[in-house]
Every structure is written in structure tokens, then in C-alpha cells.
Amino acid sequence: MRAIFVFLLITISFAAYPQYKNNAFVSLQAGDLGIGARYDRSIGDLGIYGSGAWGNYQLVNGGYINDHVRVALGGFFYLPEQMNNYIHTKVTIGAVYHFYGEKDYDGGIDESAFFPLSAEIGIGTYIKRFALAMRFDILKFEGIIDFGFNF
């Protein structure tokens, strides 16, 4: 009886981990109309992710900031609440590097806004093979939406 209990306990604990270990995403950035890619790798109930994106800001006053390149690297953990082992939710936190190319604007932007390092937080979920995530850069106030699939 004890062996059956231990076997069930081990089986249930492994069943709580996500079924798919890899996630691939297409990233959309509203701020600079950017597009990019993201990859997640689960390791148990933790994981790492990396993303890259490129876009161009079009400013209201006719100015622009071209070639905004954004690279992020971070980690995530899964939240314990899951429904029927089909829905998995994770929280992400990461560091971001920004590169800005050619800039043409008439004042109104503090130069400290172009500091290249930043941080982001986010949340993501997947249902079977479809994945959705949202990230927010807490220093630049930029939002990113990721649409993807699991494999």
C-alpha cells in the first residue's frame, strides 16, 4: 500500500509540469509598430526565455526614431493553478537591452529615455498547443504581445 501511495504521489507531481517544453512566439509591439520573435524553454516548473524585435517609432510631431532593436532575456515560473492539465499560466521577469538608430525629433523627449537597459514583467498562458503572452517594460512603458505555439 505504501508503494502505491509513493508511486501515485510521484506520478501526480510530474503530471503538474507542463506537457510541452518549448514555446515559439511572434511578438508585436504597439509603441514602435515592431515585430519580433520569442522562444521559451521550460525546465520543470521554471524556465528561460529570449526575445528580439525591431521597429520604428513615428512621432506625433512628424519626427521619428528608426531602427529600435529590443533584445530581452529572462526567466519564468509556472503558477500552480491549472485546469485539467490543459491550461498553464506563467509569470515572466527579464532584462532588456534597447538600441536606437537614427533619431529626428524636435525636443520634448528627455535623453534619459534612450538609456539602453531596462526591465520587463509579464504573464503568459497556453491552452494545449496555443500560447499567448503579454510583457510590459516597466521603465520604457512599452507593451508587447506574443502569439505562439507549443512543441
Image: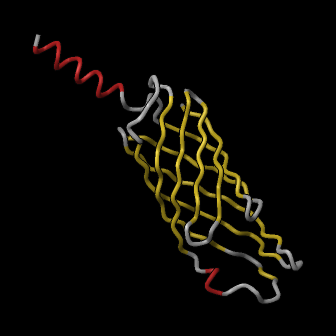
Where does the image place residue 51, in percent across and percent down from the top left?
58, 54
Instruction: Judge whether 149 appears above or below 118 on screen.
Output: above
Say if 55 sits above or below 132 in the image. below
- Residue 110: give x, y in percent of width and height: 67, 87
Q: Is residue 147 above or below residue 68?
A: above
Image quadrant of residue 130?
A: top right
Question: What's the image's color scheme?
Answer: secondary structure
Q: Nearer the viewer, residue 95 or 12?
A: 12
Q: Residue furthest top?
A: 1
Percent position of residue 31, x then y: 73, 64
Look at 51% across and 58% down and name the residue there: 121
**x and y percentages locating residue 148 in the rendered image:** 63, 39
Look at the image and tell me in which quarter the C terminus lies: top right
- Left or right: 1, with 84 as reference point: left
Nearest the camera: 17 or 52? 17
Q: Is residue 46 left or right of residue 104?
A: left
Image quadrant holding the N terminus, namely: top left
Residue at 23% x, 17% y: name it. Answer: 8
Q: Residue furthest left?
A: 2
Q: Nearer the viewer, residue 31 or 99?
A: 31
Left-right relation of 24 to 40: right
- Residue 106 drawn above or below residue 62: below
